[in-house]
Image (cartoon, rainbow, N blue to C red):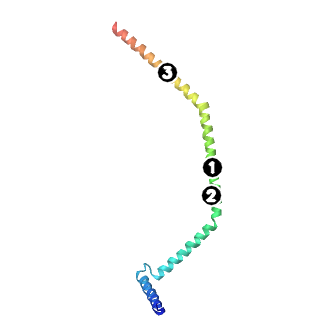
């Protein structure tokens, strides 16, 4: 192979590739430069975030620890409230239910007596 023809082929390929890129480019040079600047901004922001990752991890650990403590406190408080209900309120509710049942039984008995008396007066 001839070196001259290889170099000519490479040069022709570069020219054709460049022409193809210029003709099919989705953006103008100015837009491409602006996009590159934005990429640099994103890269800088990413570097800042990476630099702050230890601080972020520490804050996350603090927040999660506080959340666990708050959840534990809430759970304990709910258990105390339920225990208080079991000790103080539930017996009162049961007593009220018993009284309501007694009143209901008394009303039923009185209704039966009234019905019997009414039936007795009708038969006379």
Q: Residue at x 57, y 28 (%)?
A: 92
Q: Secondary structure at mark 3?
A: helix
Q: Residue furthest left?
A: 123
Q: Which residue is mark 2?
A: 60
Of labels 3 and 1, earlier in sequence is 1
Of labels 2 and 1, earlier in sequence is 2
Q: Residue at x 62, y 41 (%)?
A: 77
Q: Which residue is mark 1?
A: 68
| Residue 124 screen position, x and y as percent | 34, 6
Q: Which residue is mark 3?
A: 103
Q: Secondary structure at mark 2?
A: helix
Q: Residue furthest front?
A: 1
Measure how far apart labels 2 and 1 are at the Cα level.
12 Å
Q: Nearer the viewer, residue 44 or 10?
A: 10
Is mark 2 in CB contact (under 8 Å) with mark 1?
no
Measure how far apart labels 3 and 1 are at the Cα level.
50 Å
| Residue 111 screen position, x and y as percent | 42, 17
């Amino acid at each position: 192979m001839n070196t001259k023809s290889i170099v000519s082929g490479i040069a022709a390929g570069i020219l054709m590739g460049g022409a193809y890129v210029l003709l099919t480019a989705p953006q103008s040079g100015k837009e491409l430069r602006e996009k590159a600047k934005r990429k640099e901004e994103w890269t800088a922001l990413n570097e800042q975030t990476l630099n702050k990752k230890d601080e972020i991890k520490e804050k996350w650990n603090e927040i999660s620890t506080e959340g666990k403590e708050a959840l534990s406190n809430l759970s304990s408080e709910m258990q105390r409230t339920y225990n208080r209900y079991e000790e103080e309120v539930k017996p009162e509710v049961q007593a009220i239910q018993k009284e309501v049942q007694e009143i209901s039984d008394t009303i039923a008995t009185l209704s039966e007596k009234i019905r019997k008396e009414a039936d007795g007066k009708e038969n006379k």
